[in-house]
Amino acid sequence: MTTDPCLAELILGGARSGKSALAERRAREAGVEVIYVATGEARDDEMARRIAHHRARRPAAWGLVEEPLHLAAALAAHARPDALLLVDCLTLWLSNLVLGGDAAAQAEAGAAVDCPLLRGELRTLETVLPTLPGRVIMVSNEVGWGIVPMGALSRLFADEQGRLNQRLAALCRRVTLVAAGLPLELKNL
């Protein structure tokens, strides 16, 4: 996309790279109200522990919005010029979309993926993000550095995650890659 970048930033990295900690630090330093937009769901004990860990390290004054599917609508509802929305994370959100619609079944059946939930929510986020007042920090995994996954569903997810990261990076003013807790600025306009 060739539009002016919005007041959003994207923080990418692998698992346990320090991307969430960096996003939280930048949110604390912003000097405005922070609303944490959580996309994960505690569907098992291990995920419940991960969510509890994230909650414990966040300031109690931060707001919380839990939205596993309709991220753009949640951002539009809570964005304000005097607030920062911290989305953690786009990877879980994308997983929810792939598994919540027809995409997973279509991929596993070897069919072309045509999932209205997935396509619609991705398109809506790209449309809404540049219009939001205030700041948005989004956290996402960089999953494209490994081997091509063997299963059709895993390949679909890796492809969609890579495309999502590319499209959002094009929209954002700031993009940071985190490895071993060290941030590398890829874009800062």
Image: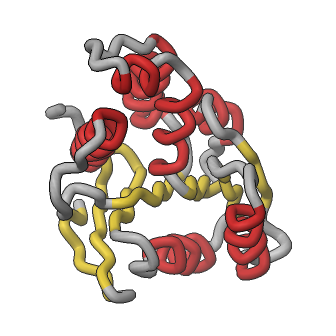
> In the drawing, does residue 70 fall left or right of residue 52?
left
Colour setup of the view:
secondary structure
Residue 16 seen in this snapshot: yes
Q: Nearer the viewer, residue 163 or 131?
A: 163
Could you say which quadrant of the image residue 88 lies in? bottom right
What residue is shown at x 68% (from left), y 58% (from top)? 36
Vertical comparison of 37 with 3: above or below: below
Vertical comparison of 14 with 110: above or below: below
> In the drawing, does residue 90 fall left or right of residue 48?
left
Q: Nearer the viewer, residue 91 or 26?
A: 91
What residue is shown at x 65% (from left), y 44% (from top)? 80
Residue 171 seen in this snapshot: no
What residue is shown at x 39% (from left), y 22% (from top)? 123
Residue 188 horizontal/vertical position (percent): 24, 65
What residue is shown at x 33% (from left), y 88% (from top)? 180
Residue 66 horizontal/vertical position (percent): 74, 46
Residue 74 horizontal/vertical position (percent): 66, 35
Residue 131 horizontal/vertical position (percent): 46, 31
Vertical comparison of 101 with 57: above or below: above
> In the drawing, does residue 65 fall left or right of residue 15?
right
Q: How many marks?
A: 0
Q: Nearer the viewer, residue 87 or 174?
A: 87
Image quarter in which the C terminus is found:
bottom left
Image quarter in which the N terminus is found:
top left
Could you say which quadrant of the image residue 118 lies in? top left
